[in-house]
Image (spheres, helix red, strand yellow):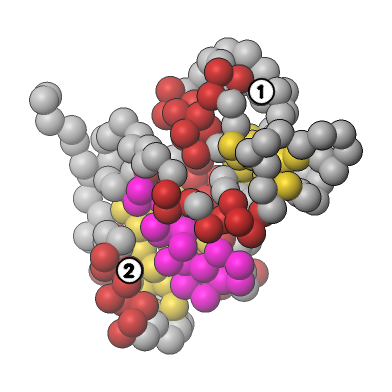
Amino acid sequence: MAVIALMAPVVATDIVAGEPLPYHIYLANGVPLANRGQILTDPDQLEILRCQGWRGVSEEGVPPADAIPPDEAALRMDRQAPVRCQPQARPVLSEATGLVADDMPLSLKLLSRLLREQGVHRIVAAENGRQAVGQFFRQRPPLVFLDIDMPGLDGIDVLKQIKSWSPETFVCLVSGNATMVNVKVAKTYGVDAFLVKPISGLNLQRVLSLYGPLTLSAD
């Protein structure tokens, strides 16, 4: 995707189930969500794009009246309409997809391997917070591990975004130096567990014991 000079909120009526998207769509902080020409049918994804999506605006031609610089758009994230996805049942580990985000390749590879050894069915890897949010939007895995100290969007930023969409998703923050401030803030956003580096199989097993399948009530 090209460098964005200006951003403008999407036109909700442009987002139609089963029809190609008319432009690339981002969150207000510039995280890519969907590409021009992509066809989506998932109601939750469509609602996120309509309520929280932004489009990049070219410097050529006359920009729309609501176009603003990217840094100003990012400041408006917390003022946008919230979107809560339909709750999903949490599967057992042997059927679950886990998302792992870490900017350190060795840590990413190690945690992914340990999760497989603990019986997690499938692993999706992200090299930074932006990728993590995009992967979650596309795949909505029920189990997420986020390194706190990632550049750009850190683990707490990603935690906040994921929990705003899907509170039932199990999110664990990973860090070698988690501060009390980080812990306190993460708890306000609904973090489910913490994992301290260096990661051991025993500590990971302890965290996964908190996961547990989640069934939805008939209500």
- Label 2 packing within 10 angstroms: few (<14), some (14-19), many (20+): many
| Residue tagged 2 | 186
Q: Tell which of 172 and 63 is nearer to you.
A: 63
Label 2 residue SS: helix
Most foreground residue, 59 or 18: 59
Q: Given contact means CB atoms under 8 Å apart, are the residues at marks 2 and 1 in contact?
A: no
Q: Position of residue 181 (x, y in %)?
A: 33, 82
* Mark 2 vs 1, N-terminal side: 1
Q: Marks 2 and 1, how far apart in space?
A: 34 Å
Residue found at x 67% / y 54%? 70
Q: Which residue is mark 1?
A: 21
Q: Give percent across and percent down for residue 4.
A: 76, 49
Instruction: Indicate the position of residue 211 as horizontal and vertical percent values.
Output: 25, 55
Regarding residue 149, the answer to whether it shows in the image is yes
Residue count near mark 1 (Cα–Cα under 10 Å), binned few <14, some 14–19, many ≥20: some
Quadrant for the N terminus in the image: top right
Magenta segment:
146-164
Residue closest to the far right:
60
Provide residue 37's location: percent of width, then percent of height: 72, 23
At 48% across and 51% down in the image, what residue appears? Answer: 77
> Is 105 drawn above or below residue 171 in the view shown?
below
Which residue corresponds to the image point at 69% horizontal and 53% vertical from the top-left?
A: 69
| 20 relative to 156 in the view: left or right | right
Q: How many marks?
A: 2
